[in-house]
Amino acid sequence: MTISVVICAYSEERWDDLAAAVASCQGQTLRADEIIVVIDHNDQLRVRAEDEFADVLVISNESARGLSGARNTGVAHSTGDVIAFLDDDAFADPDWLEHLTAPMADTLVAGTGGWIVPHWPGVEPTWYPASFLWVLGCSYDGLPASGARIRNPIGSNMALRRRVMETVGGFTLGIGRIGKVPLGGEETELCIQYATRVPAERFVLSREAVVHHRVPTSRLTWRYFLSRCWAEGLSKAVISRRVGGSTGLAAERAHLVRSVPRDLLASMLVVARDPRAGSKRAAMIVSGAATAIAGLAWGFVFARERQPTNRRRKDGATRLVACPERFARKEWSPIPIVHVDVDELAEPVAVAAPPGTRLWVEAQQEGQVVAVRDAVVDNDGGLSLVDRQGLLASAREVTSLAVRSLPDELLPRASVVVSTICEEPEQLLDTVLTLLAMDYPEFEVIVVDNRSARFDEPLPEFPTDARLRVVAERRPGVSAGRNRGIEAATGDIVAFTDDDVIVDRNWLRMLGAKFALDGDVEGIGGLVLPQELDTRAQLWFEEFYGGFSQGLHAELMSLRDDVDRGRLFPYAPGRFGAGCNMAFRRSTLRRLGGFDMALGGGTAARGGEDLQVFVSVVLGGGTFAYEPAAMVRHRHRRSEHEFMVQVFDYGIGLTAMFCTLTLRDPSQFSALVRRVPSGLRHLTRSRDERSTSVVPSYPRWALLVQTLGMAYGPLAYARSRLAARRWTRAGVE
């Protein structure tokens, strides 16, 4: 068995540490066949290392900057059957290599990890928690006994057989440490990938293979500790997306459940001897765990892997710097939205699409959508008998259609408010044009320019129309924008939509007629259907949430009726409608004080402002209506990343909204607590129960992202309230 040792370095600031690391490798009882020092994009350091290190191969990182690329370069230039890795700020015991490679006498051992002890800058601090020594790159409390199977070794002290690297393709670029950025996890991902492909082999721990990891004083600060915990969460989120959450987080879950509580208890014992040290240790454990979980949540939503490119030698051979490919997915094709009149469903319906094409079919009666179905074009180029019968059955359940012939003089004057930050000017212009084309006798459109930092840039050139006004609101957030619209409104009813929506020509007429015919109705939510299903993420939104649609049946909701709407009513606010299609009496909005400034897009709370008003109307004894004839079409987020951000944001907005309710009326807290079991059952519904598709395709971990958002919601709401107070104190109007 031949052995290569790879040490990666990037900074001359660590020169003394690097020299000690090399010297410790040269003084081993089991001599390495070669020692390779890889310099990560630092020519000055490379020249110095070449001049001063004898019998050592010094090379430059030929891959992307960072530890993963440097290690891959070292492996590509190595010749050993086994490659051992040591960090440039660590030094090994003389028998390190001997103990590290001993378990490899068993051919089923694919790799080993040694024991890393901290080399403190002075006396060992009693306040540093043993379960968080991984923050310093060291072995920590909770690891198994020597010889035990482990998921992965710690990268600063490990040995891997060459076949591990060749099978997986090397360390994944983009998820390891880059310079001083404390990301990591590349060895975790590599070992999980190998274990998945070669389950008969294993990685083991050798506690006797000891290296000493230097701990500079700069790493004994709160700032470094929390930044490293945050980075660990980000790294694990990326890894979990690649290998699956159950595998990627298994060791972390066990550590959090077993070792961290045990260390917290030990901290309480330290308090008895040294209150200051014990209290600091306990605080670090709690804050470190919370920060890592928050980093994980953020990473699931926002962290993206840097995509590397494959490199080849001059002779054409593939280098070991390639990133493993993403999991293959089925080819995606846009889903056509097909409109069919109910009367046509009795006979075969031809569709202008090849057989096998997936369709979104909407059946209409008198211009109102009364049935929606996920269908596939049959071999005859049309809708199958089963799909047509399904649409007809759904249509018959819609027992009444909205009143469309109400005389114009009975319809109340209406104001339509669109708050915008104008991210997509063309889409905003389309929204305004469809609003101005509505069939309604007396209305106005108020566009609220909510671009707090970019008022000098012009909005799209709107058509000249006396019914259209533009007002400005410098306070950030959709709630501030909508409240500004309420102030400017002159209509008896105020309707709201968003700048990524196309409204139906009869949208406002359906809302106005509902208010005119029922004086008890204080607010109305309408039907929201997709404007397009061109991307996978847009379909996921329909599957996961049912889009924004709350069904095709009109409904009146209040606490006064005796209809059984389930245990969650009225605290499952999604059933009322969505912010992009809602309307209220202006008097109701003024009585409620408008939208909560600490909620909504553009604030830390991300959403919930519409939900809070829906629930407040019903809790205040009012009646809220759902009218599917009042229809708009929404352009869902197009990318998968945007979808996950939206899921996370909606989770935040939901629990932030609950915080608002309890702060305004503390008696709501007990009502919410009583509904927790029902809420958990609703939240954990199966994909088949939740989805509108016959075969759901949205990622299973979308539910985890939503749950993490809900957990973050109360903290986000607190941040948002503080920001709202700052704007108030600043006197911004």
Image (spheres, rainbow, N blue to C red):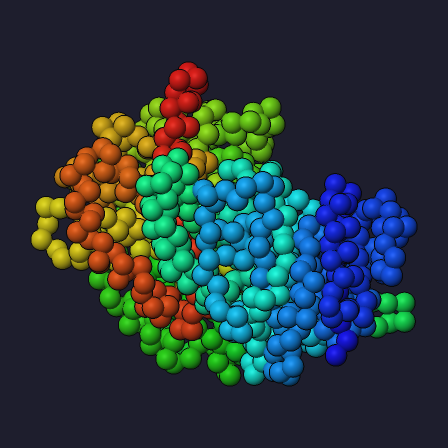
Note whether residue 170 is visible: no
* 631 w.r.t. 357: above or below: above
* 334 w.r.t. 203: above or below: above
Note whether residue 99 is visible: yes
Pick the residue in front: 152 or 446: 152
Quarter of the image for the C terminus: give it. Answer: top left
Task: Quadrant for residue 467, please give it.
Answer: top left
Q: Position of residue 408 (x, y in %)?
A: 29, 38
Pick the residue in front: 489 or 133: 133
Q: Residue at x 76, y 61 (%)?
A: 27
Pick the residue in front: 43 or 263: 263
Left or right relative to 376: residue 400 = left
Q: Residue at x 77, y 56 (%)?
A: 22
Q: Residue at x 42, y 38 (%)?
A: 277
Quarter of the image for the N terminus: give it. Answer: bottom right
Q: Position of residue 720 (x, y in %)?
A: 39, 33
Q: Position of residue 712 (x, y in %)?
A: 39, 45
